[in-house]
Every structure is written in C-alpha cells, then in structure tokens.
Image (tube, helix red, strand yellow):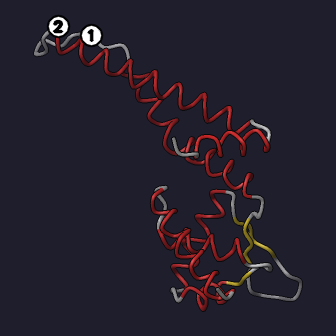
C-alpha cells in the first residue's frame, strides 16, 4: 500500500473511531491529518487535503486546541496560522481522558451528589423512594470508581499505562 492510500485509510479510520468517542467525524479526521503530518499545516492545507470548508476547519481546529491536543504555531513573516498535533500518543490519550472526565464525569458526579439525599414526597411510595435512593447510590458508586480509575490512568507512568491498556485489549 502506498503512503497516500495508507494516510487516507488512517484518516478515515481515526474519523470513525472519533465518532465512537463522541467527537465529530470531521474533528477526528482533522486531528488524524495533523497527527500524520510531519510539519504544521495551515487552514488552507487542511481544507485542501480533507476537502472541507474554511469554517469547518476553523471550528474543528479550535475544538482540538481546547482539548489540548493541537497547538497553533506562528511563523515570522507569515500571516497564516499553522497547526500541529501533539505526537506523543500517550500524552494524547491522557489529554483526551482528562477532557472527557471534565466534560462528562464531573458534571454527573455533581448532580449525583446533589440528589443523593432525598426525602419522600407526598406522591411517592416508600418503595419508590427506596428504589430511587438505591439506584442513585449505585450510579454514584460506579461514577466514583470511574473517576478513581481515570485519576489513576492520568497519573500513571507511560509504560504502566500502555502495558495495562494492552492487557485490557487482549481477547479472552
């Protein structure tokens, strides 16, 4: 397989993976392109290579910068902005995990904390109140476990992270 075909397959595959992670396919494709590009790319370069609009590039590059996995590079005498991706995949995974934790896990943990202590309402039976309280406690316990696991992975040594991840990914 030639480089251009392999690069295209990677960008498409990363786009599919990104949509499974809850980010747009295009955002993941922009990230993939920047990952495999040896040099920083301009908005125009990204537009040309992915055949997407300037607005789409700008929106997705800004989102990737918010995640901390893409950075802007300024070049003396150049008016255009250039963008490059973090190339250390362990660092990328850690940054994504941190952002997902902040955007998804922490908000639900706050809500669970607020609703964990409920009093029976006049229209609810004691069984309904007990069932609700048990379920919230169960979800809260799982969220605490997930948060603890995320903290461990974020703080983990790269070799430990990779070996643990690979063990988790082995079938059977």
Is 129 on the left or on the right of 144, as rendered? left
Pick out the residue farthest to the bottom: 48
Label 1 to label 2: alpha-carbon separation: 10 Å
Labelled pair 1, 2 in contact (Cβ < 8 Å):
no
- Could you tell me which residue is drawn at 70 percent across and 66 percent down? 70
Q: Residue at x 68, y 37 (%)?
A: 153
Image spot of residue 43 (x, y percent): 65, 84
Label 2 crowd (10 A; few <14 / some 14-19 / many >=20)? few
In the image, taking residue 94 as reference, residue 102 lies left or right, namely left
Residue 116 image point, x, y percent: 38, 17
Placement of 90 over or under 78, stated as above or below: above
Q: Nearer the viewer, mark 1 or mark 2?
A: 2
Which mark, by number, is residue 25? none
Q: Earlier in the sequence, mark 1 or mark 2?
A: 1
Quarter of the image where the N terminus is located: bottom right
| Residue highlighted by disc 1 | 119
Q: Nearer the viewer, residue 90 or 83?
A: 90
Image vertical order of residue 125 relative to residue 8, above or below? above
Which image quadrant for residue 11?
A: bottom right
Q: Secondary structure at mark 1?
A: loop
Q: Which sits in the foreground, 139 or 63? A: 139
Label 1 crowd (10 A; few <14 / some 14-19 / many >=20): few
In the shown orientation, is residue 172 left or right of residue 33? left
In this view, which residue lies farthest toward the right?
Answer: 76
- Picture coordinates of residue 97, whole percent (x, y): 61, 46
The vertical placement of 91 against 28, above or below, is: above
Q: Residue at x 47, y 66 (%)?
A: 24
Circle 2: element type: helix
Q: Residue furthest top?
A: 126
Q: Residue at x 56, y 78 (%)?
A: 9
| Residue placed most toward the observer, 141 or 157 | 157
Q: Which residue is mark 2?
A: 126
């Amino acid at each position: 397989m030639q480089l251009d075909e392999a690069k295209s397959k990677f960008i498409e595959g990363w786009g599919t993976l990104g949509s499974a992670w809850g980010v747009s396919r295009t955002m993941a494709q922009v990230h993939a392109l920047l990952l495999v590009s040896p040099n920083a790319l301009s908005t125009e370069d990204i537009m040309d290579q992915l055949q997407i609009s300037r607005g789409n590039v700008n929106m997705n590059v800004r989102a990737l910068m918010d995640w901390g996995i893409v950075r802007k590079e300024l070049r003396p005498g150049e008016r255009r902005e250039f963008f490059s991706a973090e190339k250390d995949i362990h660092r990328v995974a850690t940054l994504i995990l941190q952002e997902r934790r902040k955007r998804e896990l922490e908000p639900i943990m706050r809500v669970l904390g607020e609703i964990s202590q409920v009093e029976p309402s006049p229209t609810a039976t004691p069984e309904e109140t007990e069932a609700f309280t048990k379920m919230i406690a169960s979800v809260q316990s799982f969220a605490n476990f997930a948060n603890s696991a995320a903290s461990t992975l974020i703080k983990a040594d790269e070799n430990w992270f990779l070996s643990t991840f690979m063990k988790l990914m082995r079938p059977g």
